[in-house]
Image (tube, helix red, strand yellow):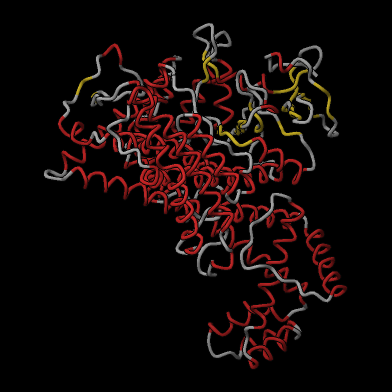
Amino acid sequence: MQDFYKKLNDYRKTSNQVSNLKKLKTNPISPKLSKQYIQSLRKNLQSFSKYVRKIYDENHGISNTEVKESIEKILNDLNFQYANSSSFRSNSIRVDICNYFKNHPIEFKNLYRQMIAEEKETGIPIKSPEIVSYSSNQEQSKRQLLEQLITSYRNIKSSFGKSEADFLNKYARSSTKFKRTLREIQPNVETVNFIVKNEMFFMDEESGLKEFFKEQCDFLSHHLREDYIESLKNISAQLSEFNLLERYVKRHNTQILEIGFPELSFSEEEVYSMNSSFSNGDLSHLSLGELSSLNAFWINRLTKEIINFNTAFFIISDLDLWSEIRKAPLKTVPNIEKDSNTEDTFIDVPITDEQIEALDEKMKFLYNETTYYYYKFLNNLNISELSTNENEDSAEGKINNSGTSVQKNLFEEISDLHEQIGSDYYNYFSTVNNGALKESNNDFFDDFNSYHISANITCNSYSIKSNIMLAQLSMLFNNSAFSKNWGLSFEKGKTPNKSDKVIIAIDIPGFNMPFRLHIERDLLEDFLRANQNTTKIPLYQGENDFFKKVTRKKHLITTPLLMPISKEYKKKLKELSSSIPETNRYYKFIKHLEFISDGVSCPDHLKSKSKKGSVKKKFLKRSYDFSDGKVYIIHKNNTFIEDKDYLGGSNEHTI
């Protein structure tokens, strides 16, 4: 075992390292897995096998090879979909900067004049690159946006023919009365519209750019909205393909019933309405912030399911269990074992714990390798190979048919790696766990190619999620109207400034539960320093409201699905909130849900209190500082006073 891993790491030293993966070192995992993990994986295999069985039942005479190829096609299509997803991050930042400049027109004017002065001083024309990956540093992204505006403005102006340019130049410099006369003598409405629309390109540049900026802001917002809605339509199709939405609703309803609020469960009609809205793109009434939240949440949710799906597919393929699935009898889950995550019927896949342990090690090894080469592909991609009609931001993994030379080089490198470690790979995985995988192919090259799609989907989708969340953070810092309560949420037993990932939670008015998602701590800290010049982030208030209190241990009331709620649902929640007694253990939970539903009814326990205990009207705000790991209360004059008691577990303190 040690020789196999040592040989791989020695090979790493002689190959070109990926800049952000220089510390990558592959080590053997512990072969022993917990019973809970094995049971979870078995349930995953049962769910996948039932999906496969449905394909067999609906396509009589279909071969095992055809079933396998149909599933590979699903995964390849998903990979293509994620890889070519819209540049949510850059587009979101652009829209955010547009909104910022709308609210700060003087800063727009001053930055423009500063850039023009630099242009005159250096003699270097302002020129934006064709492909722009927007910075999380707001000061830099402001310049990027203005560079793009100026470049586009000048390019459009230079595209007019001489006669059109002469006419528009004369028109732009005429009096209001003369402009009216010129418009009136035009032969048709189209010509008039052309004149009015293009006048901005023949004003003085500063004035024309202001008009062009307004037009582009509207265009970018509309374009981003359409991208978000189209993404949710694609997500809806996958939720339906894997029958996931019903499962999440069942999980939500189960926990709501467990804590005693059946009126807050979702009916089939409400689920149908939600799915219909997603699949038909009927989401125009939602704001950009709401659309981005839904995308981040459901991309994250769907990705986890796809990872499970691909894991099961790899295991079934590796052990060649297709015929067993085809002929295995359906079993019924005994009532005593029924829960919200289990189907009523299942197929018991013939696989031993030893095989699961060996395959788990193989997949972790392959995940390391495929992820490594995924990032290497992106880092080596020559931006000039991307045509202007293709992708906009290669850093997000959106690659169509470009980069073929890079693909060829990586194919050759993987082939070389196979030559170096292939025999060791075969020998190790054919004998590990007393030969649990001795009947498997154990060919490194084949296994790598079978598994790499999973790494691509995972890396692409989590990158999209992180990018949306960074853009959302920018919006939250600059648009206080979106949410009164958002920020870092503590995970039980984890210290935020020492964890690789942290949770951001947001109370989005009009939704059913808090938005909660992980983000890499390094990304978050980089954003805070670059964009806000701080290591502090607002703290999500009332996280203790979302814990079950039916046992000695606290269990989180999760968010299995995030969705806009109907007027009827909001009415039911309001009635429940007005009738629930303070002695009910879930009183604060219901009050918090009501606050999320309307964004107005802030419960007393989330407001600040005087030293005598009387409730103030002000919403209590706290922040967490990554630099010292302390919690601070934010005062009106933007001063910070340490809240020494908060980390002790209470979220009700006086100021």
154 left or right of 39 in image: right
Q: Is residue 296 above or below residue 398?
A: above
Where is residue 567? Give x, y as percent: 46, 35
604 left or right of 410 in image: right
Residue at the top extreme of this rendering: 552
Residue at (69% x, 77% y) in the render: 154
Residue nearest the viewer, comparing 544 with 104 = 544
Q: Quadrant of residue 197?
A: bottom right
Q: Is residue 36 above or below residue 568?
A: above
Look at the image and tell me whether residue 270 can be seen: no
Residue at (74% x, 51% y) in the render: 138
Residue at (36% x, 37% y) in the render: 309
Residue at the right extreme of this rendering: 121
Where is residue 379? Give x, y as percent: 59, 54
Where is residue 226? Give x, y as percent: 49, 56
Q: Which quadrant is the C terminus positioned in?
A: top right
Q: Quadrant of residue 443?
A: top left
99 left or right of 121 in image: left
Look at the image and tell me whether residue 247 can be seen: yes
Residue at (60% x, 31% y) in the render: 503
Where is residue 525? Give x, y as percent: 71, 38
Residue at the bottom extreme of this rendering: 163
Residue at the left extreme of this rendering: 61
Q: Is residue 204 above or below residue 106?
A: below
Residue nearest the viewer, comparing 507 with 62 = 62
465 left or right of 55 in image: right
Q: How many marks?
A: 0
